[in-house]
Amino acid sequence: MADRHESGGIPTEQTLRTLASLDAGDAATVSFYLDTDGRRFPRRADLERATADALRTIDTTNLSRLGRASVDAARARISDYVAKEFERGATRGLVVFDCDAADLWQVFHLPASVRTRAVADRHPHVLRLEALLTRAERFATALVSRDKARLLTTHLGRTQERSDVLDEVPGKHGQGGWSQANYSRHIEELAHRHYKHAAEVLFALSKTDPFDRLILAGPDEAVATFEKGLHPWLAERVAARVTLPMNAGIARVGETVRAAEDVIEFDRAAEVVGRILEEFAAGRSAVVGIEQTLAALRDGRVDTLALADGDPRAGYRCESCATLATSDGKCDSCGATMTPVADLNEEIVDEALRTRCTVVAAETRPLPDGVGALLRF
């Protein structure tokens, strides 16, 4: 069996470069991506079934005898790992690279979902993993009350405390010799100074540790008051407002961020699909349907691809120029022979990522053939 080089966390850029440079020669490296999100796959049996279905789609037709043996061994190891060793925890995406001939067994537990797929090739398929890491947004959470603030950041599932802000703001009682009105104005002024102080610390944090989105958390009244004093740059980045206790643990804050990410992703996909349909209806820079999308992808015109999750789609790839198509025969681009692919949808996503396109899951509004794109030109 291959040496077990396992990582429970996020791969570094150097790790990805090392993986990408590996060449299995006549053997084959199996790249396995599994969506392990517990909301969609709550039981281990669901993961085992998804694993078996994905591994079954690996095309070994053009592999050598050694390559087919490598795939068979990888199927057994990966299936055994998912069934007996994998612990989900906070993992929402599992990635495995396996090649016994190269002593490769690399596992990554990711905090973000991935599209389930399995493929065998001479080189590990790291493109989807790279795209996930480079495009993941950074979140800041400001957890505020009238006299305290906690600032936290979250990136790729890791939440960290960044700063505590504690200001002396007395409660609404025991005013001593003060009149009730004067005392109330005094504590309100102290609370105002506290919110301003916390906002200043947050803005300073944004300069030293930049983030893309901001979540405001705490008692509703405190959140609303704090937001009014935010710098415009911070106000533009508010992604969610939630009620949380000031002593909320790191895990709970992380769950709040993940929930916000899900909403953002859903809304982004809905917006992209809506724009595709509107642009296409107006005869502008968009295409819909499988044939038009493939043509735009081949010509390098796709900027943002929207693709619905669904059953595998039959398709073909040119042996010479890698053009994708829905029918076999001769390649329309170069005349070479077309060979079947396990799932044309997965090939489309890979090609889009290779050409630095944005890819969204079109689950919100229907597209013809479940696919469409916004164009660069």
Image (tube, rainbow, N blue to C red):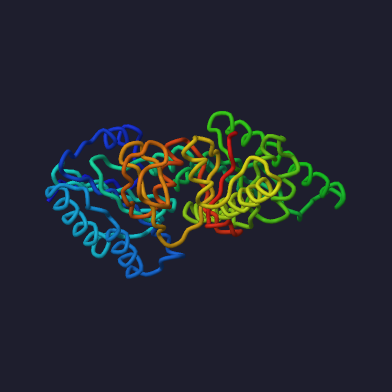
Q: Which quarter of the image is occupied by the C terminus?
A: top right
Q: Is residue 105 left or right of residue 36?
A: left
**Residue 187 rendering spot, x and y as whole percentages:** 77, 46
Q: Residue furthest top?
A: 208
Residue at 32 percent of width and 52 percent of height: 340
**Residue 176 rendering spot, x and y as whole percentages:** 79, 51
Residue at 46 percent of width and 41 percent of height: 352
**Residue 106 rendering spot, x and y as whole percentages:** 25, 46
205 over 287 or under it: above or below = above
Q: Is residue 150 left or right of residue 53?
A: right
Residue at 29 percent of width and 50 percent of height: 119
Task: Name the image quarter holding residue 355.
Answer: top left
197 over 61 or under it: above or below = above
Relative depth, front residue between 10 and 29: 29
- What is the count of numbered marks? 0
Task: Name the image quarter holding residue 37.
Answer: bottom left
Q: Is residue 236 left or right of residue 245?
A: right
Q: Is residue 81 left or right of residue 209?
A: left
**Residue 177 rendering spot, x and y as whole percentages:** 83, 49
Q: Can residue 253 be seen?
A: no
Q: Can residue 38 be seen?
A: yes
